[in-house]
Image (spheres, rainbow, N blue to C red):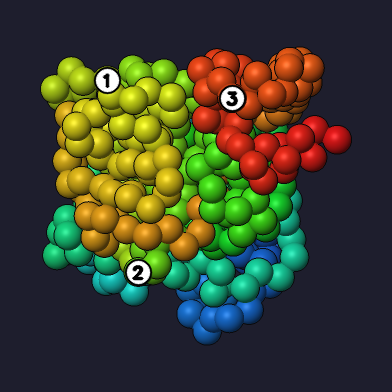
Amino acid sequence: MGNKSSKPTAQEIEELKGPFSDEEFESLQALVSATQADKATFLERFSLGPLSGTTDDILVHFGEALYAAFATLADDPEATELSIAHVAKAAAQCIRSSSSTILRSMFSIFDASHSGELTQEQVQQLFVTCFLMADACNGDVAEKDVRRYTPVAHAIVDAFQVHATHITPSTLTSWAGTHAPLLHTIFSSWMSQRCLPKRSKISYISPQLSHPSDVLSRGQVLALSTQSVDLQHSWDRLYTSTQDGLSFNRLSYHLLGYTGPTLLVCTATDGATFGAYGDTPWKEGTKFFGGPGCFLFRLSPTFLLCPASAAQGLTNYMYYNTKGVVLPRGLGFGGTTSKFRLFLDDELDNCYTSLKCGSYEPGSISLKATFQIQTLEVWGCGGEESKLAQRGYRAETAELINRARKVDKAQFVGNSFDREMFLGKTFGHGTDAARIADDEH
C-alpha cells in the first residue's frame, strides 16, 4: 500500500474522503505529494518545534514517530512510504473521530512495539507532548523548555498508578473521561492545523495569563485547561496573596462583582498545590450556589480531579458568607455548613479539606485535613465582559462608601449596626478600608 505506483481507484478515493470536504481532501493529497517528494517535509511539519531541557528521542524526533504511526493507523504497519490511503485514514482517526478514538490514535504513536501497553515513561512523554502541542496551537513557534511541562506530567503518571498497573488505551480513555475530558481536543487541533492548514477547525485554544503566576507552572495551567472550555482563552488574575496580602477582606474585594467563572488555587506550607473551580459568580449569602461545571483539584504532589457528582442529588457546590453569626463565615466548596469539602475561613487560619461529600467525587485534594496557606491566587475566566462588570460594581461600591463618609462620623463610628449595614465585613476596616479606597483611584 506504500508503493508510489499503486494508485487508488475513483471509488476508493470517494471512500477515503469520508469526513473531509473536497478542499480538505486536496490538502491531504498535497501533503502526500510533498512527503513522497521529500520525507523531510513531513518530519518538519509534524515536529514539536525547537526544544530544550530534554533528550527524549520521541520528543526530539516526533515527526518520525508520527510517520510510522500513520501507516499503523491505516492497518499497514509494514509500509515504508506514506500514500493518500495512509494519510486520509490516519487523519480521519486523529481529527474527525470520537474522543476515545482520537486518544487511542495518540496512544499508538508512543506504542511503537504494538504491545497495547505503555510504560510510565512513555505515558509521561505522551502528556508532555500534549502540553507542547497545546502551546503550539496558538502559533507559538519559539523554543520550548520541556522542563516547564515535565513535573505535572509526572504527577499525572503517579495518579495513573492508583487506577491501573498496566496502562492500556482503555486506561487512558477512561482516565481522561474524568480527569481531562478535553485532552483529545489538543491533539485533534494540532493535527488539524498540520494536515489541513488552510481548512483547519480548531477546538482547543491554550490559555493566556494576564500576569505570571506565583503558584502555577505552564504545564499545570495547560492541564487545568483540559477540564472546561472556559479555562481556555484568557485568564485574568483577580487576586494574589503575594501582592494583595493574605487577607480574607482583600480576597473578597477582588472576588465580588466579577460575573464570570473563577479558579482558586492554593499552595500550602506543606508543598501541596490544590484548589477549586467555580462556574458561577461569587455572591454573599448563607445558601450554597453554583453549577455542575464546578470541580476540585490537586496538582501536586500528584494529580487529582474531583468533578461535580450527581450521584446523591446534592448541589452544594459553592458557599460564600461573611456576615452571618450562626453559619460559618468564609468561602467553601461542597459538603455542608457543618463540614465543607474545602473551606477557607474568614481569618484564613483555620482552613481545611475533607475526603468526600455528596456534591463532588471523593478524594483528598490536600495532603493534610487542615492546612496553612503559603500562596493563594484567584483567576477570572470570564473575559472582558466580566472585568467590565466588576469595574461597574466597584464604582457603585465606591459611591456607597463616599455616601457613608458623609454620615455624621461620630454617630456612624459608634453605631456598629449602621457600620455593618453600609459596609459589611466584606469591605473591612482600618488599613483594608484605606487600601480599597486607594484601589478606586
Work out how far the residue at label 1 is from the one at label 3, CA to CA, in angstroms.
41 Å
Q: Which residue is mark 3?
A: 414
Q: Position of residue 116 (x, y in %)?
A: 22, 61
Q: Which residue is mark 2?
A: 270
- 393 lies above or below 47: above
Q: Secondary structure at mark 2?
A: loop
* Number of the front mark, 2 or 1: 2
Q: Earlier in the sequence, mark 2 or mark 3?
A: 2
Mark 2 Cα within 10 Å, few/some/many (few <14, many 20+)? few
Q: What residue appears at the point 43 percent right and 58 percent down from the top-left corner? A: 373
Residue closest to the far right: 441
Q: Are marks 1 and 3 in contact (CB under 8 Å)?
A: no
Res 158 quadrant in image: bottom left
Q: Secondary structure at mark 3?
A: helix
Res 155 quadrant in image: bottom left
Q: Quadrant of the N terminus?
A: bottom left
Q: Nearer the viewer, residue 165 or 416?
A: 416
**Hey, what amino acid is under mark 1?**
Thr
Q: Position of residue 45 (x, y in %)?
A: 67, 59
In the visual, does 68 lie left or right of 115?
Answer: right
Q: Nearer the viewer, residue 76 or 233?
A: 233
In the visual, does 178 lie left or right of 425?
Answer: left
Q: Which residue is mark 1?
A: 315
Q: What residue appears at the point 47 percent right and 21 percent down from the top-left corner? A: 284
**Hey, what amino acid is under mark 3?**
Gly
